[in-house]
Image (cartoon, helix red, strand yellow):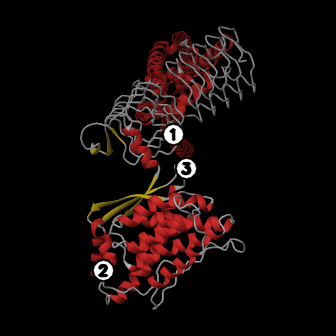
Amino acid sequence: MPEDFRRANLRGRSFKGQDLTGADFSYADIRGADFTKANLTVANFTGARAGVQKRWLIGQSLISLALSLVSTLSSAIAGYLVVYLLLPSAEQNIIAGVLVLATMVVLSIVIIRRGLEVALGVITVAVAVAVAVAVAVAVAVAAAGAGTGTVGVAVGFTGAVAVAIAIAFTGVVADAIIGAGAGADAIIGVVAGAGAVVGVVAVAGAGTLTVAVAGGFTGVVAGKLSTAYIAWRALAGDEKFALVRRIAVACAAIGGTSFRNADLTDANFAQAILRSTDFRKATVIRTCWSRSIRLDRARVGGTILLEPAVRGLLVTGNGKNKAFIGDNLKGANLTGADLSNADLTEADISGAILQNANLERANLTKTQALNANFDQAKLTGTCLEAWNIDSTTQLDGAICEYVYLLNNQRERRPSSGNFAPGEFTKLFQEVLSTVDLIFRNGIDWKAFTYSFNNLVLDNEGTELSIQSIENKGDGVVVVKVNAPPNADKARLHSEFNQNYEISLKALEAKYQAELKGKDDLITVYREQSANLKDIASLLANRPVTIDVNATAESKSMNESTDSSRKIEFSNNQGDIFGNALGDYSTISGTVSKTIQQLPTSTDPNQPGIKELLTQLQTAIETDSNLNPEEKAEALEPIKDLAEAGKEPQAGTAQKTAQKAIRVLQGMAAQLPTATQFVEACTKLLPLIKPFLGL
């Protein structure tokens, strides 16, 4: 039974590595608790308070005070130095003062405009230059005996750079830590500022009291304003100050609640306070973050929460009109989220929950949506161009009136009106169960038949059949092949294309010879083949005599594992499909003889396999829409079925019969105009199967 920790005081408790599946921590105080590597699947942390304990807050405040003191003292010294050097006491001092002031201004601009990381690179170069200048000036002074004013210029410049480093790094980090965790910014700032001015006065001496106070105060104010601004931008998610944010959040999370490497699958953190919490490398699949507080102040490295836009969407559920282009939302819990008009182009929402989400008019172009759950999601007007789904994508219950298959509201489906209930799901389920074979220059049906039959034979355990043949115009034909949802469609598509290209090249070479190299006639032939009404007549009346013999060598069932296939072409009359069909009259006689060897049915009202195969043979031979070559090709598997019917219980016989039936089904799908043959296959093949143990 899941453990109950509701409203419990669990501050500082260790649950490291424990199995807490389904445990209830709702509204518990888990500040400082350690859940590292714990199994918290389906755990409930609704309203829980995570973060650091009070003693750690005091430590953070002291660290922030120390860093802030260094920063403000540096600012005060810089201010004093600038004011002092700008006094009209000596020309060299004025030059040094201008250098110091210019250096501070330039570095401040670089930090604010380009970020702290870029500025640190500039500072590194500046330090090197300053050191080189100081050394050069010192050497010159030693050689020429120049006055100390010249040395002051170099020293002033070097000092300015050093002061800039101290202000930029320590001050910003201090303010960021305060914002991320401690929350005592005003007190720390006042204490540090007062201490800095006092320090400057003590160093400067009573004789320059006015200058020290004025310069120190000015430096503290300027430095504090700049560091506070940078810290604020860093905690707001400004990428220019990502380094500052990472350091500050990491420091603020020391001693805080830890979920590092924990399994938080389906856990619920709704309305939980998550400041200074460590979620690094935690498993956050379908985890609920709805209305959680200060998740942006938690350590989330190695999770989908790292991206601010994603984190904001998971917390607020509001992604309306926003862009999530290429974002990682794998396993995100987006139940009820508003993503209307959102741009999810190339985003990954695989495994995400989008139940009851509003995705109306959203752009899902090239979106990865494997295993995503769209139950009751609103998808009306959504663009689904090239999105990636599979059999695990849950579309049942999706609410959709129409969608677009191309960007910019093109290719509306349905073209007019709206989907009836369930039609949208059915449309895309059909897409999932087909392999689309696209031919852009028409189809060579002889090459197609050879390639498709080989595909069927090479994938015995996969049910493949042709669903439809569509003429798209301009020579483009799309053949949709039914395949199981779990089939490797990419592999099937690739295998067919390889076989088709091989046979097509061989046939084209033969056509070239027969047509005396007239390539344009080959193109006309293939484009005309795209007209489905003329397919049968073209194949039957083609005046070209094709002299081709193709032999397919598949692996021996008992001896070889070589799956290679060799295609041979000769000048003898024959078949291009690897089964040496021979003369139509010869094969017809052979089939009749083989069928006659089968037992006759004892029940005149119940035909047996002999009678059924005879009917199928008759349908093939009397179909006027089949030419002699096609009839010979169709009779070959009939002969195989008759041979298998002699010993139907033999394992090899059943495999042979299964292949023969698939070949006949494939031919029936490819020759829709041969109605007599197609109807016979549809009616008789299911009746023949039981006699063969299929």
Residue 166 placement, left or right of 86:
right
Residue 458 visible in the displayed image? no
Task: Indicate the quadrant containing the C terminus: top left, top right, bottom left or bottom right.
Answer: bottom right
> What residue does disc 1 label?
350
Residue wearing tag 3: 486
Is the residue marked by circle 2 packed among few (<14), some (14-19), or many (20+) residues within 10 Å? few
User: x, y percentage for residue 538?
Assistant: 30, 75
Q: Is residue 283 left or right of residue 385?
A: right
* Rendered image quadrant of residue 362: top left
Residue type at tag 3: Asn
Mark 2 or mark 3, earlier in chain: 3
Asked if residue 658 lies left or right of residue 354, the reply is right
Of labels 1 and 2, the one closer to you: 2
Q: Nearer the viewer, mark 3 or mark 1?
A: 3
- Which kind of residue does numbered mark 1 sit on? Ser
* SS at badge 3: loop
Q: Residues within 10 Å of mark 3 (few under 14, many from 20)?
A: few
Q: Label 3 vs label 1: CA separation?
A: 17 Å
For mark 2, what is the residue? 541
State which tag comes first along the sequence, 1 or 2. 1
Which mark identifies residue 377? none
